[in-house]
Amino acid sequence: MTVIDISASVMQFLLAFVVVAPLLGAVAALLPAPPGLKGKSPDQAVLRHGVTVTGAVLIATIVLAVGFDHDHPATMQATTDISWIPALDVRIHLGIDGISLPLLLLTALLTFLCALYSYFKLPAGPSPKAFVALVLVLESGTLATFAVLDLLLFFLAFEMVLIPMYFLIARWGGGQRQAAAWKFILYTLLGSVVMLLGILLIGLKSGTFDMVALATDNGRGLTTSVQVIAVLAIGLGLAVKTPMWPLHSWLPDAHTAAPTVGSVLLAGVLLKMGTYGFIRILLPIAPDGMRTFAPYLAAFAVVGIVYGSLACLALARTGAKGDLKRLIAYSSVGHMGFVLLGIATMTPTGVNGALFANIAHGLITGLLFFLVGAVKDRYGTADLDTLAGATGAALYGRAPRLGALLAFAAIASLGLPGLAGFWGEMLTLFGAYSPAEGLSRPAFRTFMAIGAFGTLLTAAYMLIVVRRVCMGEHTPHSRLSPDERAPQAADGPEPSGAAGARPGATTPQLADIQTYEAAAWTPLAALTVLAGLWPAVLLGLTDPAVQKLLAGGKS
């Protein structure tokens, strides 16, 4: 069933447009604005250009989803297959199915919302032209990663996002941005070198880099030893990008230093590329190798769940001087641990849970980073002790709508039933209860129990954050020094209305949610509720495609 019947050639064009348009838009952003389109200033013109291009890409992606045949989500649709390097049998092969379509939509939506937000709230840094061009290159590389069906093209698209994200952190970031950017690029590049070796091994041993053909073969053309080596090499590169414990240490630094839109794109989009690679490449192409490493992947996943939660609890406690952005970054380590656990089960239930958790994490954590960025702009700091020490009723009393939305995002992140975060975690744990044939049930049930304990820890630190940031400390004057009570940026003047109130004084108000903020955040909140109340919309797309993928290309 298609909502609107769109011809195959138009679908092909739409997918190609979605991948290429941001790249062309990035080039155009660096050129002078045509006469009549400059607006009040060249800076405003290029920011409007970014909104226009990302908006056009989002519309094209929505039309692509509307024209998608929802009765056959396991079939590759809107496919383009053109020979590119005949000597290596490398092809420009594009296509989407029920696995990649939701990720394509998530990427297009988040990038558009970031461009819209930046139009009104551009982060401090160099030329806006360079900022818009980098965001568009980042979008093109991410969309290409989810749309290409050739292993070498996948690698090129996978790497394409590294340079723009490096510069977004290094040039538009906050404190320690240079060190964080270098750590990000070194970790991911080293992982990518190993991943390329694994991709070349598969291509040379099987005679093709075509991901559809390799998935249909289901590893029959590769010996077990080749599969084990390939999974180890490719898996390491993907695990760095995911990020899997203990290869995660670049993430908190990158998030803490990145500008708000950089954090949103990093958490909401870039982290999904690693887990998508596990599902699209390793599960169908090297199943025997995955079966060998699945218990270890699951073990690392649950350690990451507990470790991320304990790190968040440590940052959230009174007197720890924890950074709220850093706390949300560590929470991502835990949430992506659930995604990896679902993949490690190698079952339709677990993999569907992983895909659902991917989308839920993109929506909820993207919203959280938007909100934390707004709180930091208003207070001049993201330090939890400073935010909690603000007198009055903290955010509830000073910016009630902002406080309410932050509380909503926090409880969505902890997996409250009825919101998007619940279904991915639940399906992942169900998958671990009954893993694929050949995997140890006692081991995976142990992992399930540890993962379930991790959900309790997640609830604990998120509720602490809501209590401290939204409600404030019960006795702020007795717990904090006068310096700690003043929510003042270390490197600048105190934000307007951010001064702590003296006992008996009227609580100063902060600017509540602005119109442009509401426009950027409302879609994420609405989709979080929709996915929580109507999960069949997403699962109806992913389940048939996952069943086919795990069955070796057979529906």
Image (spheres, rainbow, N blue to C red):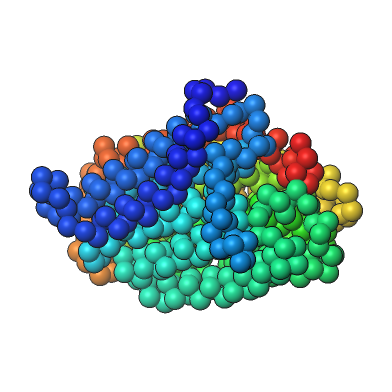
Question: Does residue 280 appear to the left or right of 477 in the view shown?
Answer: right
Q: Residue furthest front?
A: 86
Would you place residue 399 above or below residue 385 in this image? above
Q: Which corner quadrant holds the C terminus?
A: top right
> Camera-side residue: 340 or 18?
18
Residue 548 left/right relative to 96:
right
Residue 453 to residue 415: above or below: below
Who's the residue at 72% across and 54% down the image? 214
Q: Quadrant of the N terminus?
A: top right
Q: Who's the residue at 79% across and 68% down the image?
A: 226
**Number of callouts:** 0
Between 390 and 206, the residue placed more toward the observer is: 206
> Considering depth in this image, is 245 or 469 the residue closer to the camera?
245
Identify which residue is drawn at 53% across, 59% down. 84
In this picture, residue 341 sits left or right of residue 81: right
Picture coordinates of residue 539, whole percent (x, y): 64, 34
**Can residue 456 be seen?**
no
User: Residue at coordinates 21% horizontally, 59% vertically from top-left?
Assistant: 31
Q: Position of residue 233 (x, y in %)?
A: 69, 70
Q: Nearer the viewer, residue 503 or 198?
A: 198
Q: Left or right: 371 with respect to 121?
A: right
Say if 344 sits above or below 392 in the image: below
Q: Residue 46, can we see it?
A: yes
Q: Does residue 72 lie above or below 319 as drawn?
A: above
Task: Please state the horizontal and vertical placement of residue 498, each as a whole percent of the image.
Answer: 25, 53
Question: Residue 23, image x and y in percent?
Answer: 37, 55
